[in-house]
Amino acid sequence: MQIAKALGKIAVASSHQVEARPVGRAYPELSWHAVIVGWFLGVIIAASIGYASLKLGFSIEGSELAAILGFGILRGLLGRRSIVENNVTQTVASAVNGASSGMMFSVPAIFILGQGSEFDPVLLTFGCIAGAFLGIAFIIPLRKQMIDFERLTYPGGVAVATILKAPGAGIRKAVLLLAAAAVAAILHGISLGTGVDHFDLGALIGMPGYMSGVWYLSLLTLGVGFISGRGGVAFIIGGLVVYWVIAPMLDLTDAFPIAADGARITDPEALRVMLFRPVGIGMLIGGAIAGVFFAFPLIASAVRSMQDAAKSKAGISADEMPIKLLYYAIAGATVLLVFMAITSVETVGIGRGLVMGVLGTLWIWMAGIILSEAIGRTNWSPLSGMTLIAVTLLIIVVADLERGDAIVAAIMVGAATCVAMSQATDLMLDMKTGYLVGATPRMQQLGQFMGAWLGPIVVMALIFVLHEAYGMGSAELPAPQATALASTVDGILGGDVPVHKYIAGALMGALLTATQGGLGITVGLGFYLPFAIVLTYGVGTLLREITDRRKGKTWSEEVGIPIAAGFIVGEALVGVGFAAYMILGA
């Protein structure tokens, strides 16, 4: 209650301060228009990107989407012309979406491991809200050091600032995005209604079945491929190597697996489940762990940033939220995290729950700083690796409990830490944007808090709707990152897992990541996911390369990316809506 009152006082005082400044702050910034529109857009973006991440195994940044749609509503519909107000809208919306990757990488693992009915979703939701507040509160004191003093790049934040500085272009992009969303929604609705969602081109041209020439009819997948551009090439290569190199070699050497009846197993889906997916999971795990290992220089840099900030008192500024309020937020969120750990299952107890809560809090503090440093310098965040390590540490604490209790307790606290880390990196990206457009840091920080509480509620509801309709870990929702986490937990608890395949994949993933950050994870996803998704994704990547070369990168950024983003939003919302319809109609 004290925190809420303090937040309210600061918001009111800040709004009066904004109105009182005759120079340099003539435009509204933290307003109810900005917050309400941010909530609305945040729900749409969290549902869209959350759904896409369960399909493809990775998440895309939602700030650019929020900035484009924010222009469409604030300027196009409401006639409001403040860039810094739109910046707050984008901050609130991306804060809501911050729970998306954090929870989609972790919570589905509970369902995949068969414990979906054994945990308290309300408790987990509040724990994730506590984690979100912790991540924000821990990272705010480093804003001035990392952005003002060290001037870290944060390419994603720069891209959003470019949109905000081009008001006319922002409205045009919003129109393109909404039109593309409508097209994708209609086509996906037809696909769901008819049941036609794949096209077997391979069979038409006489390809062997094991080469899997089936294409997934999905504008969402094509749109993600376009936005990723060259960054997604490794994902495509992973799939091509599996089905167009390894599978033919198995045929030539007569090395296909043998079924119980003595027949060779050549069906591509059966091969994926038996051979390729376990290796892919190993690559995800090995690539993630190696990514953390090779991030040690960034860790050292982050530690120096903390030391420098402490010496110069960089985190304490008139434009920042009061440090005392941050202490309240940290203390309150830590207590809630400890409470969640203690009450997650009856067998945890006070002592073990206290250890889990404190361990989770310390990991949030350290990992959030590391991730913010990594994304600021490289635009790549090893979030999945940090989540794997967090849950591994937590599962060790509860390893002596019954299998189900250990799974629920560790993943619940792990999900909260994952959301916290996601919020820390998201806030620093948004703060970079604010720095470039002249926003007041305090306004953005308040906006982040005002959006962060909503995300876990939306995403938790989304997870239950999608699981009831399709099932987590199914062909419709592969949830690769959560499946990798589930496999790691199963292995630690002594489950029956193909250890040799995981180890082989982990070694390959680690070696690939050693050559380039994140490479082991993206190639591993190509091994893991159905090849139909990889092929369609590849079309999007190819289209991006063609438009970059023939029309120029400006055209791709001004026209192509808004259309691709619209494809994601339109198809995802119809997919979520169809899932809700299936549940209500059952």
Image (spheres, rainbow, N blue to C red):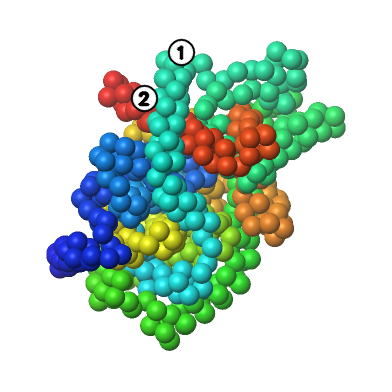
In the image, residue 240 sits, relative to residue 134, either above or below, namely: above
Mark 2 and mark 1: Cα distance apart in space = 13 Å
Q: Residue at x 25, y 55 (%)?
A: 28
In the image, residue 465 sits, relative to residue 193, either above or below, namely: below
Judge by depth and name the residue closer to the eye, 424 or 469.
424
In the image, residue 1 sits, relative to residue 169, either above or below, namely: below
- Mark 1, residue position: 194
The answer to whether one can see residue 234 in this image is yes
The x and y percentages for residue 82 are 30, 51
The answer to whether one can see residue 276 in this image is no
SS for callout 1: helix
The x and y percentages for residue 416 are 37, 57
Q: Residue furthest right?
A: 253
The x and y percentages for residue 95 are 35, 53
Classify 10 Å Cα crowding around label 2: few (below 14), some (14-19), many (20 and above). Answer: some
Q: Residue furthest bottom?
A: 311
Image quadrant in which the C terminus is located:
top left
Image quadrant in which the N terminus is located:
bottom left
Amino acid type shown at disc 2: Phe
Judge by depth and name the residue closer to the eye, 364 or 7.
7
Q: Which mark is residue 314?
A: none
Q: Quadrant of residue 435?
A: bottom left
- Mark 2, residue position: 578
In the image, residue 351 sits, relative to residue 536, either above or below, namely: below
Left or right of residue 123, residue 233 in this image: right
Q: Residue at x 34, y 28 (%)?
A: 577
Amino acid type shown at disc 1: Thr
Q: Residue at x 38, y 83 (%)?
A: 313
Q: Residue at x 40, y 25 (%)?
A: 182
